[in-house]
Amino acid sequence: MSMRGERIVSLRCAICLVAIVLAGCGSRSFVMPARDGAFWVTGSSGRLSGAEEKARLVEDADAYCKRRGKNAVVIASNENDATPGTLAAPGKLARATVQFRCQ
């Protein structure tokens, strides 16, 4: 194999590795205002269960409120575990949403 061919193969392997690593990562939205002084935070993860993701979001909500000298009070929350799939099937992540107030 020529040097150019080896570079192309190496580049393809690197791209595949990056795609696999990113597929395992979760995402978390920013704290968003809701109505009546409440806030929302949502997240998803390919590594955690829905309950674990929700617990992480509750910690984020509390940290958000503590920066304002208050504590988070959870108003509502929900979680969904990941559904079976492959890396090629996006949207197969555990998801959670937490609504809270700072008091």
Image (cartoon, rainbow, N blue to C red):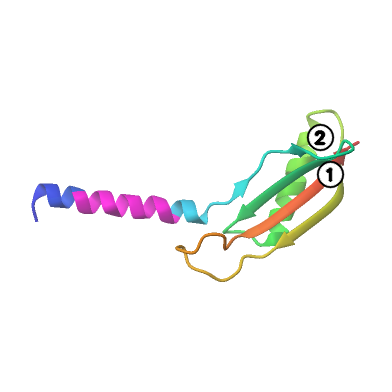
Q: Main secondary structure of the magenta part?
A: helix
Classify the position of the N terminus by image quarter: bottom left
Q: CA distance from mark 1 to mark 2?
A: 9 Å
Magenta residues, start to end: 8-20
Does the magenta run of residues contain 100?
A: no
Return the mark for residue 100. 1
Q: Residue furthest bottom?
A: 84
Q: Amino acid at mark 2?
A: Cys
Residues tagged 1 and 2 counted as in contact (Cβ below 8 A) = yes
Of residues 66 and 98, the one nearer the viewer is 98
Q: Say which quarter of the image contains residue 32.
A: top right
Residue that sits furthest to the front in the current view:
35
Q: Secondary structure at mark 1?
A: strand
Residue neighbourhood size for the residue with mark 2, other residues' Cα within 10 Å, grouped as few (<14), some (14–19), many (≥20): some
Q: Residue at x 45, y 53 (%)?
A: 21
Q: Earlier in the sequence, mark 1 or mark 2?
A: 2
Q: Is residue 61 left or right of residue 45?
A: right
The three-letter code of the residue at mark 1 reads Phe
Mark 1, other Cα within 10 Å: few <14 / some 14–19 / many ≥20: many
Q: Which mark is residue 65?
A: 2
Q: Position of residue 76 (x, y in %)?
A: 85, 52
Percent of width and height locating residue 51: 73, 60
> Residue sitting at 67 percent across and 65 percent down?
81
Q: Nearer the viewer, residue 95 or 65?
A: 95
Q: Position of residue 70 (x, y in %)?
A: 87, 33
The residue sitting at 29% across, 54% down in the picture is 13
Of the 4 image quadrants, the one containing the C terminus is top right
Where is residue 82 drawn, in percent x and y?
A: 62, 65
Where 41 sits versus 90, above or below? above
Q: Residue at x 11, y 48 (%)?
A: 3
